[in-house]
Image: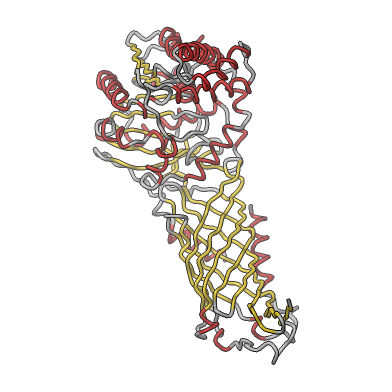
Amino acid sequence: MLKTAISILALLYCTLCHSQCDSINDSSTRHFNLKFSYNSSLIYPGISTGIEFPLNYVNVHVFKNQKLIRCFKKGRFISGNLNWYHHPDFHDNLYLTAEWVMRRTRYTGFMSEFSIGPGFSRTFLGGTTYKVDDIGNISVIKLAGYNYALITIGGGFGYDFSMKKKLPFSALAKMNLISMFPYNSTIYFRPVLELGIRYTPGRSQIKYIRNPLQYQNNNERSISL
Amino acid sequence: MREVFLFSLLLLFPGCQKEKITISDNTSEVFYVENAGASMRVQVQGNTASNTFILVIHGGPGVSSYFYDTKYISQNLGDKYAMVYWDQRNAGASQGASNGENLHLDQMVKDLKKVIEVLKFRYGQDMSLFLLGHSFGGLIAADFITTPGYQNMIKGLINIDGSHNYPLNDTLTREALLTEGIYQVSQKRNVDEWQPIINYCNTHQGNFSLEESQQLEKYATEAENYIDSIKHINIVTQVLKYTITDKYPLTAILSNLLYSEDSNFNKELAVAQFSSSLNIVTIPVLVLWGKYDFTCPLALGEDFYNRVNSTDKSMLISFKSGHNMILQDEKFFCDKVNEFVMKHR
């Protein structure tokens, strides 16, 4: 379990290293997003916080008969999240995830995303936990619970307020399925609904290219149908 | 990172695991007993002030005690006694990591002993404790009370459609299906449904393999649907009714059930039997059975009843129940359990 935790932390730490970044990158690729959301496991409450860094993005313009019919932004991100939910009498689950995120944002602001990644979970049982030794002595186990490896996969949609209103945040609704193992020698699945906001410090300064014919760089891609 | 993690723990979790012991006529609390890689959930509901506890040993293996905690039982037994719902290892809301190698009947009996010790530690050594075993829970109960010295830990045993002898169980299930099937066909009731069951029983006559045993159990469950005089229970409706109010961890219950159903543990169970040692049982025993129980047929209950050496024993039959009398004939179940506990507490 310690190895799993170290691997996750190492993965997260890599995203903070800028020493090998391309120095001529567009400055907008270096912005990070902060996420804060209600992390409901169906009816049970929880919180999720996270930070995500863009790996790359591309503005896609789709033309038909030389007429622009659709344009959107495709981005790839890596994120680190600290999540918690509380299921009364069952357990509290504190879990750390490192996710690879694919996001597509239309110029209307509507966005959809998919994410997948590994994680580490620590549960805390939902009641006093006793241990009885072979001669009948009873003791209470402090902070009783289990460590699990975890994989999360999820998808959702939201609205990016920076596209139309130049506000540096977006709203998101996302359904994740977390699987924890080895849980009683099997796998434990749990659906988790995230409702929250994502804040991008300095996002309002980013210029979005409205007319793709005026500007094209490495982050631009045109498709003709 | 470590500091953040520890700070989060300090803020969030000590409150959840604070020891809470309530003596009242309306208790509802949960604790866990950790043993051999499993943390087993124990829920205490009802009148702890009565100092009388009924510990429910659920069926399965792998089913949960959540399904036994109904509103009717709360109102008709929980008002007088404390109902104790224990989720066995790898079942219900019980938790653990890689613990499948400990899934054995003997281990479950050790678990049960420790659950009883913790119950007495929490609520008083002088409590009146009764075991109530249903279906597979009857096998654990039979193993427990035939372990030398263990029956002294309880005041009495209530056996509800429980199996104390799996090989005999299979033989009697086949006989019951065949007898009832032939009768139903003669009455021209559900002929198309009964015929494959009769054919299967005719072609599989004994020395059952695990697969045959599981097929007989499937037919036994199915056959209840073809008896008009019993109350039919829709398990899905039942689960949905209590999922939110009782805070079911549904996916955990399902994962545990699928694992237990498919584990090697079932091979061990296929040959488990306690008929030969039941004669050491002398505590009061109540045997309650559903007339149309094909999963654990009535003759199995009679075998249990005849073999225990208790001077105070009784066997009663519900004529509108199959294997799940607790849900199918709630009034009969609660009334009879109430009379028995009241007499022997």
Residue at the image position 44 percent from the left and 43 percent from the top? A129
Given residues B80 and A26, the one toward you in this image is A26
Location of residue A34 by image quarter: bottom right
**Residue B5: image location, x then y, percent:** 53, 62
Residue at the image position 73 percent from the left and 81 percent from the top? A222
Task: Residue at the far bottom: name it.
Answer: A214
Residue B236 vertical placement versus B217 (above, below): below
The tally of labels here is 0
The structure's colour scheme is: secondary structure
Apparent side of residue B120 relative to residue A123 in the rendered image (left or right) = left
Residue A10 vertical placement versus B23 (above, below): below
Residue at the image position 48 percent from the left and 61 percent from the top? A39
Residue A75 vertical placement versus B3 (above, below): below
**Residue B188: image location, x then y, percent:** 46, 15
Residue B275 vertical placement versus A16 (above, below): above
Apparent side of residue B153 relative to residue B165 in the rendered image (left or right) = left
Apparent side of residue A96 relative to residue B32 in the rendered image (left or right) = right
Apparent side of residue A27 relative to residue B103 in the rendered image (left or right) = right
Given residues B121 and A39, the one toward you in this image is A39
**Residue B327: image location, x then y, percent:** 37, 29
Location of residue B157 by image quarter: top left
Location of residue B160 by image quarter: top left
- Can you say which quadrant of the picture contains the C terminus of chain A? bottom right
Given residues A140 and B40, the one toward you in this image is B40
**Residue B345: image location, x then y, percent:** 27, 22
